[in-house]
């Protein structure tokens, strides 16, 4: 897919969201960061992006942020809070509604490699977050947009290589650099091969 020049990142101040901003800027995109608290955005990034302050649960604020964009990255998360939530799925529904209203076609959404696992094998403490990820996937599949589901394994602080393994429908490995995750969330927007796929990815292991 060509023609994506402007993207908005939801969840832009989280670990993954910040890496999405950095990678998108490095790749030459016109970037909007949708944030609840602009003070959490590092100054060097804030000076290079359009900062849109709002709550992903506020449909009107989401609509304003999506209007005029070519693509969307969803990097919503709850940090270390593993309690029951519908924030990520309800926020995703607001984003999808705004995309439909404004004719924005392509979105990538970050969830978890646990979505590939049998539920009986998932550590119990993650089940509530996983349940909301499942609701996100259901919303994506029910939408009319061209979505890419990105399901990373454990996210590390290692430097990015931009050379990593991606597979559809399964998790190919145990870890991924946060920088490479951000890179894929941005670059998959222009790769038709990933549309309507749940993508697992991991750092390449040296032979």
Image (cartoon, rainbow, N blue to C red):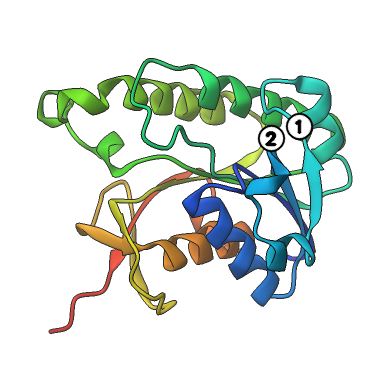
Q: Name the element at disc 2.
A: loop
159 vs 51, left or right, is left
Q: Are marks 2 and 1 in contact (CB under 8 Å)?
A: yes
Quarter assignment of residue 79: top left
Q: How far is disc 2 from disc 1 in space, using C-alphas?
A: 5 Å
95 vs 53, left or right, is left
Q: Nearer the viewer, residue 44 or 183?
A: 44
* Residue at the limit of the structure toward the bottom, as seen here: 207
Residue at x-position 78% and y-position 38%: 53
Badge number at residue 28: none
Residue at x-position 45% and y-position 21%: 135
Residue at x-position 54% and y-position 21%: 87
Residue at x-position 41% and y-position 28%: 133
Percent from the top left, x then y, of residue 129?
35, 25
Residue labelled with disc 1:
54
62 vs 143, left or right, is right
Percent from the top left, x then y, of residue 113?
29, 44
Q: Nearer the viewer, residue 84 or 161?
A: 84
Local crowd at mark 2 within 10 Å, few (<14), some, or many (≥20)? some
Q: Nearer the viewer, residue 109 or 17?
A: 17
Residue labelled with disc 2:
36
Q: Of label 2 and label 1, which has the lower sequence position?
A: 2
133 vs 30, left or right, is left
Image quarter hosting the C terminus? bottom left
Percent from the top left, x then y, of residue 200?
33, 53
Percent from the top left, x then y, of residue 141?
52, 29
């Amino acid at each position: 897919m060509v023609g994506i020049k402007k993207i908005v990142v939801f969840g832009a101040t989280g670990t993954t969201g910040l890496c999405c901003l950095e990678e998108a800027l490095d790749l030459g995109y016109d970037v909007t960061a949708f944030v609840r608290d602009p003070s959490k955005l590092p100054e060097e990034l804030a000076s290079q992006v359009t900062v849109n302050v709002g709550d992903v649960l506020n449909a009107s604020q989401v609509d304003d942020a999506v209007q005029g964009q070519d693509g969307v990255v969803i990097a919503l998360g709850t940090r270390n809070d593993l309690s029951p939530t519908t924030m990520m799925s309800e926020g995703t529904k607001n984003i999808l509604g705004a995309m439909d209203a404004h004719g924005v076609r392509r979105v990538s959404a970050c969830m978890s490699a646990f979505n590939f696992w049998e539920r009986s094998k998932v550590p119990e403490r993650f089940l509530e977050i996983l349940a909301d990820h499942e609701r996100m996937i259901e919303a994506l599949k029910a939408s009319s947009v061209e979505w890419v589901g990105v399901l990373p394994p454990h996210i590390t602080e290692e430097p990015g290589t931009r050379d990593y393994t991606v597979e559809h429908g399964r998790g190919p490995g145990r870890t991924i650099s946060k920088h490479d995750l951000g890179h894929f969330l941005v670059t998959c927007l222009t790769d038709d091969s990933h549309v309507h796929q749940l993508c697992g990815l991991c750092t390449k292991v040296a032979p």
